[in-house]
Amino acid sequence: MENIYHSVRLDDEKCQGCTNCIKRCPTQAIRVRGKKAYIISDRCIDCGECIRVCPHHAKYATTDHFNEILKFKYRIALPAPSLYGQFNNLDNVDYVLTGLRKMGFDDVVEVSKGAEFVSDATRKMLELGVLKKPVISSACPAVLRLIRTRFPNLIGNILPLLTPMDFTARLAREQAKQKTGLSDEEIGVFFISPCPAKQTAIKNPLCYDEQSINGAFAIKDIYPVLLQTMDKLQPDELEPLNDSGIIGVGWASSGGEAAGLLKERYLAADGIENIINVLEELEDEKLNDLDFIELNCCTGGCVGGVLTVENPYVAKARIQRLRKFMPVSCNSLPEAFNLDALGWTKEVRPSPAMKLADNVLKAMRLMTELKEIEQSLPGLDCGICGAPSCRALADDIVRGYAEKSDCVFSALRGRDGDDGWLPAPFRADVHPRPPATDDYAHDFERAFLHQKENEPPKE
């Protein structure tokens, strides 16, 4: 099992063991045992889907406390472009950026600025033909972890470039060192995040060894204080901090990154179930006519992250309005820029989370046993056993984490035809059904005529 940091956590006191979360987890990383859910660490990708669906708010995301900035002499804020979609009637990004300065940051560097550099680098690499197509965006860290866990054969298609968050952090840190003469230890760089996956990527990066970001704050935690600060700003107090355009800010919502490549053969999908469908088709080689695929785990893109405050569709509409007042782009790489400086420094490897065994022969034997157990189960995928599906229960059984008797249907099968103990949907004979007829047109006509006969006369 990998020893990794996770920002998605479980509050045992709030958990009711309701099984809502086990059905929505894309990597089947949650089980319910002893009336409580628990998260299998090496399968969790920190997508936040369990936070979104838990009716008891038992899942939550950990981010850094704002007082962390006090540990540094020079403090830099990196606002995600999705932050701009949280504010109504925003027509000037400098209100947000100046507000962050007023909150205690010495400098503010937009992640949308870094996004424009990454877009430019991606365009250049596509033109050079050095990428395996279709290229999969590496911007969403939850998608990256999903691929290495469930679709390891697609790792070679992932864009091997730093994310805008990481590139902006490195850029901001270098500029701060040149400006102030301070050391790395004296400069604090903090990302304002829309989702827990970004926090996990900061604490436990997959693609490089050195991290330039010191911490992350949730948008929902920053928002109330920032909104009050912005309300007090006068027009003459605004600082000209905005340094990005339509392409960079467009990364906030689904399709923005792909559109910034100025290519026609691309696909953009958002929402965990939709991206799994896309990855399955890509694995089956059904999408080879595309150049680029943009995938976001959150609905609507980063504006739909669980650490935001606004409805993702409302936030997306606000981003679209805001972009009308911006130039196309404010940043591009120099002609002589070495693209390797934007590349990964560490190879992404498949996750061992789904492996049954390291030994091939043992894994094959366990897989045969798994299939036999799965066929003996009822195939209802009801979740009563605490696993998300019958196959997941069979997997737990061969690993030694569950027993076949955990399935209530298998444990009580063969009661001489007596199924009164079963819930109503699973009984062979329950309440009488209402009468049905195949003559729907006749029924509709009769109802229509009855209504006309009982209508009051028109004046």
Image: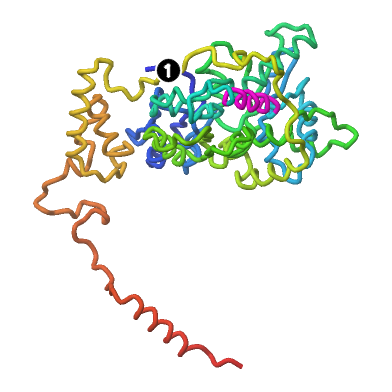
Of residues 421 and 26, the one nearer the viewer is: 26
Task: Tell me if I can see residue 220 in this picture.
Answer: no
Amino acid type at image mark 1: Arg
* Residue named by callout 1: 349
Q: Main secondary structure of the magenta part?
A: helix
Instruction: Find the residue positioned furthest to the right.
Output: 236
Query: 223 above or below 181?
Result: below
**Image side of residue 331 versus residue 428, left or right:** right
Q: Assess whether residue 117 is covered by the magenta stretch.
A: yes
Q: Assess whether residue 151 is covered by the magenta stretch.
A: no
Where is residue 236 shown, x and y percent of the image? 90, 34
**Image side of residue 81 versus residue 406, left or right:** right
Where is residue 206 shown, x and y percent of the image? 50, 18
Quick one: quadrant of the N terminus?
Answer: top left
* Residue 70 placement: quadrant: top right
The residue at 66%/30% (across/down) is: 80
Where is residue 182 shown, x and y percent of the image? 75, 7
The residue at 21%/24% (across/down) is: 366
Image coloring type: rainbow
Instruction: Find the residue positioned furthest to the front.
Output: 128
Of residues 293 and 367, the one nearer the viewer is: 293
* Residue 77 placement: quadrant: top right
Query: 200 above or below 14?
Result: above
Q: Which residues are magenta?
A: 113-126
Q: Considering the numbered disc 1 on the image, is that residue within a helix, a strand or a loop?
A: loop
The residue at 75%/24% (across/down) is: 108
Instruction: Find the residue positioned furthest to the left.
Output: 416
Where is residue 372 shown, x and y percent of the image? 17, 34
**Image side of residue 102 versus residue 264, left or right:** right
Of residues 226 and 149, the one nearer the viewer is: 149
Of residues 426 and 159, the one nearer the viewer is: 159
